Image (cartoon, rainbow, N blue to C red):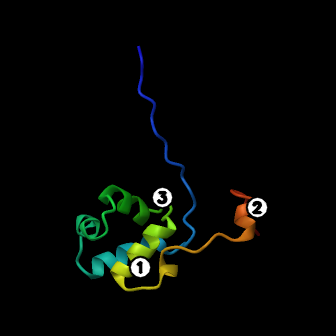
Amino acid sequence: MVTKARRRRRKLPVPSAGLPNRLRKLRVDRKWTLFDVSLRTMIQPSVLSQYERGKLEVSPERAHLLAELFGVPVSEFWTPPTLADVAYPGVANG
C-alpha cells in the first residue's frame, strides 16, 4: 500500500507580534471577509486565516501586497530578520 507524502508547512514564529490582531482589525474595519481580501490579493482565504491566527509567517512579498491593500506601512505585517535570528534560528533572545 502506497501512501501519499504529506507536505508539511513549517510553523514559524510571526516576526511582527501584533500581526494577527492587526490584520484582522484592518479587515474587519472595512467589513471585508477573508474571501474579499483573497479576491483583492490572490492569497488563499485559508492562508489569510493562518496569518490572522499567528500560525503562518507572512512572506516579504505578501507583506508588501497586504500593506498596499490596506494603505499601511509594510512594517505592520513584516519586519526583516535580525542578525541574531539568522545566526541562531529558533533560539530565544534575551
Mark 3 in CB contact with mark 2 (< 8 angstroms): no
Q: Position of residue 83 (x, y in %)?
A: 74, 69
Nearer-N-terminus badge (3/2): 3
What residue is pinned by disc 1?
Answer: 67
Furthest residue toward front: 61
Q: Element under label 3? A: loop
Residue drawn at (52%, 80%) of the image: 75
Nearer the camera: disc 3 or disc 2:
2
The amino acid at mark 3 is Leu
Specify the amino acid type for callout 1.
Ala
Q: Which one is nearer the viewer's eye here, 88 or 28?
A: 88
Locate the N terminus by quadrant. Answer: top left
Amino acid of disc 2: Ala
For the point 44% across and 75% down, the residue is 64
Using the numbered discs, state the Cα–Cα distance from disc 1 to disc 2 in whole angstroms: 28 Å
Q: Which residue is mark 3?
A: 56
Q: Secondary structure at mark 1?
A: helix
Label 2 crowd (10 A; few <14 / some 14-19 / many >=20) = few
Q: Residue 36: x percent and y percent?
A: 23, 69
> Residue 85, how many percent across, how many down?
70, 64
Q: Is residue 46 above or below residue 3?
A: below
CA distance separating discs 3 and 1: 17 Å
Looking at the rendering, in which quadrant would you find the C terminus?
bottom right
Residue identifier under label 2: 87
> Taking 10 as reference, is 28 left or right?
left
Which residue occupies 48% across, 74% down? 77
Residue situated in front as seen by the camera: 61 or 74: 61
Residue at 49% x, 64% y: name it: 59
Q: CA distance from mark 3 to mark 2?
A: 21 Å
Q: Earlier in the sequence, mark 3 or mark 1?
A: 3
